[in-house]
Image (tube, grey):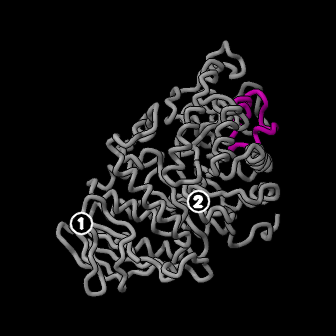
Amino acid sequence: MSDDAVPLVPHEPAWVRHAIAWHVFPLGAVGAQALRPEGDPADPSSPAGAAAGEHRLLRLVPWLDHLVRLGANVLQLGPVLDSMSHGYDTVDYLRVDPRLGTEEDLLTLIGQAHARGVKVMLDGVFNHTGIAHPAFARLAQEGPSSAGARMYRLTWPGGEQAWAPGTAPGYERFEGQDWLPALNHASPEVADLVAGVMEHWCERGVDGWRLDAAYAVDPVFWRSVLPRVRAWFPQVYVYGEVIHGDYAGVVQASGMDAVTQYELRQAVWHSLADANLYELDWTLTRHAEMLERFVPWTFVGNHDTTRIASAVGSRRLLGHALALLLLLPGTPAVYYGDEEGLEAVKEERLGGDDAIRPPLPAAEWDEHSPGAPTRHLHAELIALRRRLPWLHDAVIERLHLDNRLLSLALRPREGSCVAAQEEAGGVVLVLSLEDHEAWLPTGGRGRVLAGAHGLDPARPVDGGVVLPPTGWAVLA
């Protein structure tokens, strides 16, 4: 395929400009078993069939109303396809994990989401499979000349000519994990597999994809996949999980719409926890450069990270993190439970993700739940974001910076459609980590659009504002 197959600078679908996601890890959220039960999910008498008969995925349907009340309009689902354990060890890309239910359950969830104006995105685990995937499990019997052998990165004892039935190959493991054989992305069979899976689920209503472990895949591989998918589904949105490196280069080489902005997530929590806003400022400089080429997927928590309420060290700083998530340019995602202010620490051990992937309660959080103030703040800031859709790719200008004080001007990028004249000049976000009142410059803006709950409001003084101790505000 020629380099002309994908534009050098991808153009995301128009709907993404207004997208705010609620990210759910389904296996955890519905309290599924840790390991896939044995048997055929289509056989109700088998353990897998019995699990499928619980239809746990449908437990997410009532939570769509919570998503909408929060102000979000995208449901980002973690792994839902048939897997061995945590969802990232796929055994069947065309079947729903029986621990979650059936394909009909997923289609019901998608249909109910669309009825509410909510897009649905799936997690595409295409860097590796589980060892129980049939193509891998058959290798010892089918040998090096099989189609399955071309799909994985293998070595055969004594060489391919020495193979005899029953001889299993050596294989490359994703991050050294024995149960995760890495796919061979130079193989046309793998490109066909991935394109076919994405098209299969897009035909069933899926609106977008997160590409898991995209940092481990040669970005050029996606040029053999994404044009095929977009030919049939031009409005599909695709972003990749990229932890470090040249984000803009990966987007350009791959043709993806975006990648995860892990640098910004790290800078947000760490600069707040350590009272070093210079770290955040340095990252915002890189963030602004990325925005010249693509709009990143932004977040302060996900299924792989310590909860933001735990990471920042003080709950007084949780609002600062949220204001940064929802005011800074990007496509923002709220990880389920963060809106309730849940706390949990990721641990580097077997089962160390369990605490950050908990079951949702049987009923939606209400006005009497401990996290109601945090949830209200999420809704308030998401509503503000909805009023200012130009924030998606806004231009960032620093007005003031020191270790504990930051003032940022955000204004529409040239060519943005601004609905009201009062928004044309942009807004200012001010943050204070001081334990006393502090003045920050705001370029003359002093009308408070949002601010820290439970504290005195920012008050205009001499072309800036005075913030209360550990306060923040959004000003017009």
Highlighted range, magenta = 134-158
Residue 359 image point, x, y percent: 46, 34
Q: Nearer the viewer, residue 218 or 430?
A: 430
Left or right of 252? Residue 351 is left
Q: Nearer the viewer, residue 24 or 65?
A: 65
Q: Is residue 152 magenta?
A: yes
Q: Nearer the viewer, mark 1 or mark 2?
A: 1
Q: Quadrant of the N terminus?
A: bottom right
Residue 57 image point, x, y percent: 59, 33
Residue 193 image point, x, y percent: 76, 45
Dividing the picture into quadrants, the one containing residue 368 is: top left
Left or right of 111? Residue 386 is left
Residue designated by label 2: 19
Dividing the picture into quadrants, the one containing residue 16 is: bottom right
Residue 281 image point, x, y percent: 38, 74
Q: Residue at x 54, y 59 (%)?
A: 260
Type of the residue with mark 1: Asp
- Under circle 1, the secondary element is loop
Q: Residues within 10 Å of mark 2 (few under 14, many from 20)?
A: many
Q: Nearer the viewer, residue 52 or 365?
A: 365
Label 1 – label 2 distance at C-alpha: 32 Å
> Considering only order in the chain, which callout, 2 or 1, is on the residue closer to the N terminus?
2
Residue designated by label 1: 456
Q: Is residue 38 magenta?
A: no
Q: Residue at x 58, y 68 (%)?
A: 295
Dividing the picture into quadrants, the one containing residue 461 is: bottom left
- Under circle 2, the secondary element is loop
